[in-house]
Image (cartoon, rainbow, N blue to C red):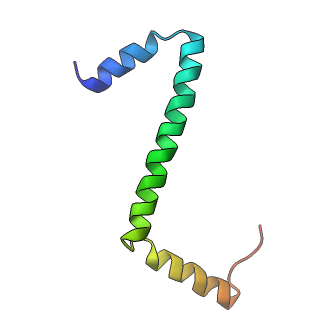
Amino acid sequence: MSAVQEIETAISKLSRQELLAFRDWFCEFDATAWDKQFEQDVAAGHLDTLAEEAIRDFRSGSCHDL
């Protein structure tokens, strides 16, 4: 059995209260991981092209209010 399958099995056995606590924990865990990856991508310059395009569109008046 893979680690993912073991985790799935364990999660399926949680009580409602435990599941709520797990969701809160996992949401925070996932957000932290996403933030870390985003910061690494920014530092590595992976988003420079998108940022430049957004600035160019803004300056040219191509951005519109929603």
Residue 5 horizontal side relative to residue 59, left or right: left
Question: Which quarter of the figure is the C terminus placed in?
Answer: bottom right
Numbered label tally? 0
Q: Quadrant of residue 2?
A: top left
At x 44%, y 47%, the residue is: 33
The percent coordinates of residue 29 (x first, y second) are 48, 38
The percent coordinates of residue 1 (x first, y second) are 22, 18
Residue 48 horizontal side relative to residue 57, left or right: left
35 is higher (above) or lower (below) than 52: above
Farthest residue in the right direction?
65
64 is higher (above) or lower (below) than 23: below
At x 49%, y 53%, the residue is: 35
33 is higher (above) or lower (below) than 23: below
At x 36%, y 70%, the residue is: 44
Farthest residue in the bottom direction?
60
At x 77%, y 72%, the residue is: 65
Residue 59 horizontal side relative to residue 22, left or right: right
Taking depth in this image into account, of 7 and 33 the one nearest to the observer is 33
Farthest residue in the left direction?
1
The percent coordinates of residue 47 (x first, y second) are 45, 72
The percent coordinates of residue 3 (x first, y second) are 27, 24
